[in-house]
Image (cartoon, rainbow, N blue to C red):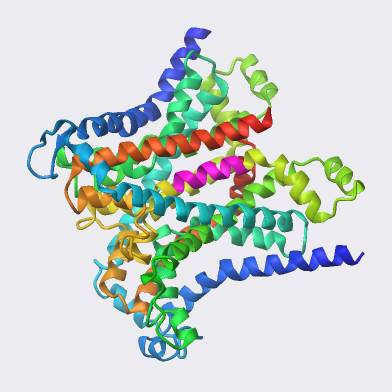
Amino acid sequence: MTRRRESRVAGTVVAVAATALTVGPLLAIGLLAFTGPDQFARDGLGIPSPWTLENFAALFADPATMLRPLLLTTAVAAILAVVQTATAVLAAYVFARLEFRGRDALFAVYLASYLAPPVVTFLPLYSAFAAAGLIGTFWALVLPFALASPYAILLLRQAFRAIPAEILDAAELDGAGHATVLRAVVVPLARPAIATVLLVAAVSAWNAYLWPRLAAGVRFPQVQVAIGSLQSQYDSNWTLVMAGTVLAVIPPLLAAVVVQRPLRRALELQAGS
Amino acid sequence: MTRRVGRTAALWLAPSALGVGLFFLAPLAVLVWLTTQSWDLLAPPSWAGAGNLAILGDGGLLRALLATVVIGALALAIELLGGFALAHVLTSGAPGSAVLRTLLLLPWLTAPLAVGVVARWVVAPSDGLLAHLVGARVDLVADPVAAPVIVALAVAWQGTGFAALVYAGALAAVPREVRLAGSLDGLGRWGVAWRLDWPIVAPTTAFLAVVGVVQVFGLYDLVVPLTGGGPDRATETVAMHIVRAAWERFDVGGAAVLAVAVVAVEAVLVAAILRRTAGRLR
């Protein structure tokens, strides 16, 4: 009996600590973003008094600082999310449902592209894009990632395989071709997984830093590149930097709260992969 | 029938296969070619033969590998043990665990660069959070022992919630009878967790370990604002080492050699993890 209570207390302690550690830093950025630089110099972290928008006003005084990176990143993330998800749905259906020679070997190649550290391909990609005169263009940001997202394909393949074969076989017996089966049966049943893939694709594009900096850093800075240069430029102006960081962090978190259920489900399913 | 399957497969795989071919396989081939070239990103590349291999002898790669492994091992230990413990809390149905599940998603979705920026503010020597709390200058990022630990803590902040959610999925699949049998045999709650659950979720641990290795070998964004690789390269990861060779010293051939070496080391590590779990399962 006491043992039971002890373990419950331990559980609560772990839960409270985890919550504080998770939320604390995010809360701190939020507070600092609305704190004036004078109060920051005096108190460090505290409740803003008064709450001020001057950090944000400073960020938006020149549209090149944050506004343009935010708009650009929104466009890149939207394009990549839609195209990656579309190609991933098609590929995942093939890998999950169709049998042909070399299928597993091909899937292994897809997986390998997920395992290699990105910087390894960035080096030759940069060379190729430089040779083609594409460095410093919008296309350099989008092209390398548009066609295939191995992570998305892996996740969708798993979701498609979880659909009972009888349902799909029945649809095929009714004379439905693969296109019809995919559109009318698989996609509606896998909607949570597809929502997850859309979110993860958009968030990865939004959070990207190294390739966007190398490929188009000065002319087309994405939002993380903008934050990086903000921090190195205004090293001790923390309230300004945190206002920028809030803008860079909030959109993915909001999107995640909207689709949290399918996202959590997808993570829990990964255990079985 | 088979013909139709073949046509659908080819047609539907075309876009993604083109992507993998053009933006993964072809770059790998170019990378291998680059290892033989002398190139500064400006003048046309010229043949260097085996000359680029000299970069492997300057000790820089070994140092970067060491820093990467230290940061990765520490972060992964926290992520796996912390995640496993948290997963038990999540699956116990304690009040508030549903909210906690949502909160745990947030660090995973936060940009690594932003995590590095916030961590930098925490440890900033004169105006950071720690310095304010202590009331004096604290220069942890200038300390060659503390700096990698701080980087590892920031990495673990991002990964522990993710690990907890994945573990929670695995734990939910552990049959009730297994735990019941364990407690009838006199195992306490920790005993059940450690002696029964932990071995059962070994495949999940392997999956998380592979993801962790992949991540730490790509670790770059978070380190840039936090330590910049310092002090004296104590936190210069392999990814940062390669980026610097190519885009700061403009030694593309040397950077390509480093990249090939790093891929080889990572492949050996991943294979070792997978083989270990496969062996244990059989």
User: Residue at 48% across / 52% down in the picture?
Assistant: B72
Magenta stretch containing residue B208, yes or no? yes
Identify whether A147 is placed above or below B217. Answer: above
User: Is B7 in front, or is A149?
Assistant: A149
Magenta stretch containing residue A198, yes or no? no
Task: Kindly report the secondary structure that dominates the magenta region of the rendered protein.
Answer: helix
The quadrant where residue B114 appears? bottom left
Viewer can see residue A191 = yes
User: Residue at 26% across / 58% down in the picture?
Assistant: A221
Identify whether A47 is placed above or below B76. Answer: below
User: Residue at 17% across / 45% down in the picture?
Assistant: B251
Q: Is residue B126 left or right of residue A260?
A: left
The quadrant where residue B67 appears? bottom left
User: Is A130 in front, or is B3?
Assistant: A130
The quadrant where residue A133 appears? top left
Viewer can see residue A76 = no
Q: How many marks?
A: 0
Indicate the position of residue B52 as horizontal and vertical percent values.
19, 38
User: Residue at 51% across / 8% down in the picture?
Assistant: B2
User: Is B213 in front, or is A157?
Assistant: B213
Indicate the position of residue B161 as horizontal and vertical percent values.
59, 57
Indicate the position of residue A132 as horizontal and vertical percent values.
16, 37
Identify whether B23 is placed above or below A220. Answer: above
Look at the image and tell me in which quarter the C terminus of chain B lies: top right
Indicate the position of residue B186 as horizontal and vertical percent values.
90, 50
Residue range highlighted in magenta: B205-215
